[in-house]
Image (cartoon, rainbow, N blue to C red):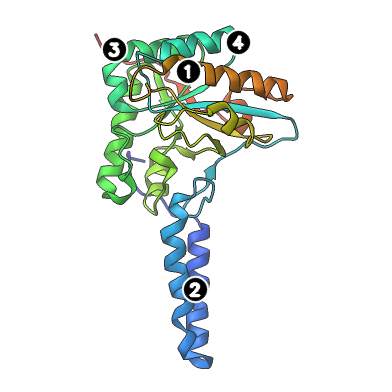
């Protein structure tokens, strides 16, 4: 299948809700015509709200947590890499012998290819987080959505990998995303535990916010980008370390995302492209 081609659609909660809404509309037309528009209005409202719920899986299957009975969680980092913080984070993870998943943007992959190599060399997974990290990406055209994902896939192929997991910016989805991802052989992976740090714009209480929400199977969302003022990197790094220590103290095992969800986050290409960044 060509990249971005829309495959045969599968039944989703959105389809089921839509069919139910129209069925109720038809039935009410005969018995309570004054209420006939209500189910359609509720369906429209649901379509407007559901995309902003990262765990909803309304338009497509979404992986937001792992299964199993053990107290395992996975750490994931979005929006990077960033030369001011990613090397520090990699050293921290190395000291604790932890493997994380980095959902990188295409722009930062182009800017900092050495950091992407370092992430991979240290044994971490890399996922696709779109090219520009446009918060309004899901309001754009299908062509723009395809371009944002495939452009990043092409960039990461230069490192000899193909991400199998896509995390949409801000966790927002839309009805076009499932067809695009299926055409690329990818799946949507979001999160179930976040600090609401707004891309490290609000890092106060980072560890407290995570540790009070975490539960077995959680996919923890953090960010490896510099705080806006650039002077709170040490505070951010301390917060991440407190999360690691707090999870361990609480009896949690921090495992690779691929292990938590039971499938690969990325795959190695048989023969890495001869193209490379300088």
N-term-proximal mark, 1 vs 3 = 1
Q: Nearer the viewer, mark 1 or mark 4?
A: 1
* Helix, strand or loop status at disc 3: loop
Q: Judge the density around disc 1: few (<14), some (14-19), many (≥20) Cα neighbours within 10 Å.
A: some
Few, some or many C-alpha atoms within 10 Å of disc 4 (few <14, some 14-19, many ≥20)?
A: few
- Label number found at residue 21: 2
First in residue order: circle 3 vs circle 2: 2
Q: CA distance from mark 4 to mark 2?
A: 51 Å
SS at circle 2: helix
Q: Nearer the viewer, mark 4 or mark 3?
A: 4
- Provide the secondary structure element on which disc 4 rests: loop
Which quadrant holds the C terminus?
A: top left
Count of numbered circles on the image: 4
**What is the spatial separation of the Cα atoms under label 4 and label 3, in whole angstroms?**
32 Å
Question: Is 256 on the left-hand or right-hand side of 181?
Answer: right
Instruction: Label 1: state its secondary structure.
Output: helix
Q: Residues within 10 Å of mark 3 (few under 14, many from 20)?
A: few
Asked if 185 appears above or below 254 in the picture, the reply is below
Residue picked out by circle 3: 274
Circle nearer the viewer, 3 or 2: 2
Q: Tell me the residue at 42%/28% (across/down).
A: 200
What is the spatial separation of the Cα atoms under label 3 and label 2, in whole angstroms? Answer: 53 Å
């Amino acid at each position: 299948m060509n990249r971005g081609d829309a495959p045969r659609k599968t039944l989703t909660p959105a389809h089921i809700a839509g069919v139910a809404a129209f069925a109720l509309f038809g039935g009410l037309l005969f018995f309570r015509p004054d209420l006939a528009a209500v189910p359609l209005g509720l369906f429209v409202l649901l379509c407007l709200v559901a995309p902003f719920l990262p765990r909803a899986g309304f338009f497509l299957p979404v992986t937001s947590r792992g299964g199993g009975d053990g107290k395992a969680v996975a750490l994931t980092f979005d929006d990077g890499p960033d030369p001011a913080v990613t090397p520090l984070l990699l050293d921290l993870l190395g000291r604790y012998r932890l493997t994380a998943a980095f959902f990188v943007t295409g722009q930062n992959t182009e800017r900092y290819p050495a950091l992407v190599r370092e992430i991979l060399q240290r044994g971490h997974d890399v996922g696709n987080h779109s090219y520009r990290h446009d918060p309004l990406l899901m309001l754009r055209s299908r062509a723009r959505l395809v371009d944002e994902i495939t452009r990043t896939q092409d960039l990461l192929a230069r490192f000899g990998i193909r991400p199998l997991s896509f995390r949409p910016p801000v966790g927002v989805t839309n009805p076009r995303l499932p067809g695009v991802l299926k055409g690329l052989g990818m799946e949507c992976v979001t999160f179930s535990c976040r600090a609401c740090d707004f891309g490290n714009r609000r890092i106060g209480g980072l560890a407290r916010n995570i540790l009070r929400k975490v539960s077995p199977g959680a996919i923890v969302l953090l960010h490896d980008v510099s705080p806006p003022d650039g002077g709170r990197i040490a505070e951010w790094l301390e917060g991440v370390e407190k999360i690691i220590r707090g999870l361990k103290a609480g009896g949690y095992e921090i495992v690779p995302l691929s292990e938590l969800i039971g499938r690969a986050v990325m795959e190695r290409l048989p023969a890495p492209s001869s193209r490379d960044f300088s």
